[in-house]
Image: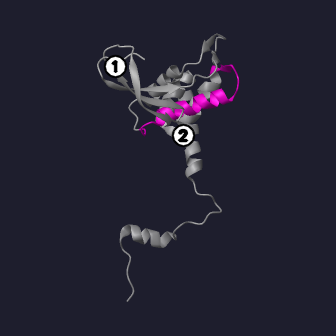
Amino acid sequence: MNCPYCGNLESRVIDSRDVDDGVRRRRQCSGCSARFTTYERLQAASLFVIKKDKRREEFSREKLMSGIRKACEKRPLPTGAIDKLVDDIEAELYQMGKSEIPGAVIGDMVMKGLRDLDHIAYIRFASVYREFADITALKQELDTLIGDEAAKASQPVSQLPLLPVEPSLAMAGGQRRRRK
């Protein structure tokens, strides 16, 4: 491992810890005594992506991360949300056990993940991935997204309200009277 400060090839491991999908090592350079951290991950068997034009390209985690980051740019997402999404997608791809995966499968996984994570990032990604021909196609996608959210937010008919309607309105207005 080259020292990032002086380029020396000699370093020693000070601390080593297991992390989610690999090992985190704290190192100290033998030349300049600077300390730095490295992360080691097991590299799984090669995975190839079959593109739209039938070309085969080796799967690149960095390329996946870059595309998702562009869609999520300037969005108020929790720290590590993008990394977790990429980790989940990559793990799912390797769990499939196939050596070649169509790019459309990966795109659909990203769409699903972004839909759950952030709607604006989802629409940004969808506009590039689905190559909307015109504003009508984009509007249809937005209407679908809004319809899905309304379905999730609506209360089931069989479920009773948490508070009766009248007292909850009175509490909101601050006009509740006490009996003596």
- Closer to the observer: label 1 or label 2? 1
What's drawn in magenta, residue-wise? 77-103
Assign the C terminus to one quadrant of the image.
bottom left
Spatial CA distance of label 1 from label 2 is: 47 Å
In this picture the colour scheme is: one colour
Left or right, 1 with respect to 114, comes to: left
The residue labelled by disc 2 is: 116
Left or right, 173 with respect to 108, comes to: left
Q: Is residue 173 visible?
A: yes
Q: Residues within 10 Å of mark 1 (few under 14, many from 20)?
A: some
* Residue 123 x/y as whole percent: 51, 31
The residue labelled by disc 1 is: 30
* Residue 5 x/y as whole percent: 31, 18
Residue in the picture at 38% in, 83% down: 178
Residue 170 part of the magenta segment:
no
* Residue 120 x/y as whole percent: 47, 35
Residue type at numbered disc 1 = Ser
Q: Is residue 141 visible?
A: no
Q: Earlier in the sequence, mark 1 or mark 2?
A: 1
Looking at this rendering, what residue extends furthest in the left direction? 32
Residue in the picture at 34% in, 13% down: 7
Determine whether 177 is above or below 85 in the image. below
* Residue 161 x/y as whole percent: 56, 66
Residue in the picture at 59% in, 25% down: 107
Determine whether 178 is above or below 133 in the image. below
Secondary structure at numbered mark 1: loop
